Image (cartoon, rainbow, N blue to C red):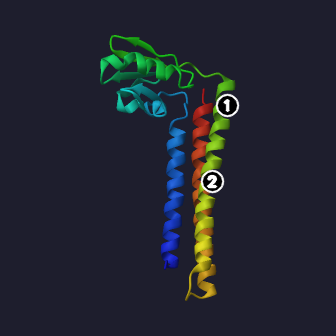
């Protein structure tokens, strides 16, 4: 049997997870600056299976508009280059001397607007996940026995406050990332 405190704690954990997930998704969205996390979604065909790029190479960003990908196994360079090109990130990698240089093209206004739409979609998914954690907790609170209705009402208020806080944090993340993407 769960207690009200446990239910609230679990719901907060669920909301925190939603927030972290959204942060991670946002880090993969390209702004004007190069970030090694931009290539986290790239899957490379290596050794007979598809693996994350970071399992077959290290990624660094020595300059604001350049990523360097260094394969752990030089024989994988062609496969890595192909995976980056086909990852639909709008990048054109160039392989030279065992290192793959990935220059970031300047983004045009239309591309920035498309990325902002993607950010809004990801933020909405985050909000839905936060609300889902709230709904789960609310259902569990209704089933708690041996607790006064007042305690349940207070717990629901606390739950709503936590939900509002996490959604406000998501909005803050969205605004910051949107500004970063739109910055020329």
Height in image: 184 above or below 175? above
Please give the name of the residue rendered at 63% of the width and 86% of the height, measured from the top-left corner.
149
Quadrant in the rendering for residue 165: bottom right
Q: Please state which of residues 151 and 1 is positioned toward the viewer in this rendering.
A: 1
Quadrant of the drawing holding the C terminus: top right
The residue that disc 1 covers is: 114
Looking at this view, name the residue that lies furthest to the front. Answer: 48
Please give the name of the residue rendered at 52% of the width and 71% of the height, measured from the top-left corner.
8
The residue that disc 2 covers is: 127
Helix, strand or loop under label 1: helix
Mark 2 or mark 1, earlier in chain: 1
Report x, y in % for residue 169: 57, 54
Helix, strand or loop under label 2: helix
Report x, y in % for residue 125: 62, 49
Height in image: 29 above or below 23? above
Is 18 placed left or right of 56 in the picture? right
Visible in this render: residue 161? no
Please give the name of the residue rendered at 60% of the width and 30% of the height, measured from the top-left corner.
183
Crowd around label 2: few <14 · some 14–19 · many ≥20 (10 Å): many
Is 139 placed left or right of 94 in the picture? right
Report x, y in % for residue 51: 41, 32
Please give the name of the residue rendered at 49% of the width and 43% of the height, measured from the top-left corner.
24
């Amino acid at each position: 049997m769960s207690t009200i405190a446990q239910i609230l704690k679990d719901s907060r954990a669920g909301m925190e997870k939603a927030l972290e997930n959204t942060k991670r998704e946002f880090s993969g969205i390209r702004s004007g600056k190069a970030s090694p996390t931009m290539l986290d979604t790239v899957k490379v065909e290596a050794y007979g299976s598809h693996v994350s790029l970071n399992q077959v190479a290290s990624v660094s960003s020595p300059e604001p508009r350049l990523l360097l990908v260094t394969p752990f196994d030089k024989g994988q360079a062609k496969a890595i280059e192909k995976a980056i090109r086909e990852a639909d990130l709008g990048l054109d990698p160039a392989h030279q001397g065992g290192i793959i240089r990935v220059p970031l093209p300047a983004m045009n206004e239309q591309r920035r607007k498309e990325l902002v739409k993607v950010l809004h979609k990801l933020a909405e998914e985050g909000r839905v996940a936060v609300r889902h954690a709230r709904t789960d907790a609310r259902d569990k609170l209704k089933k708690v026995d041996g607790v006064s209705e007042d305690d349940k009402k207070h717990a629901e208020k606390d739950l709503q406050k936590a939900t509002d806080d996490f959604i406000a944090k998501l909005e803050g993340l969205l605004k910051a990332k949107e500004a970063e993407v739109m910055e020329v």
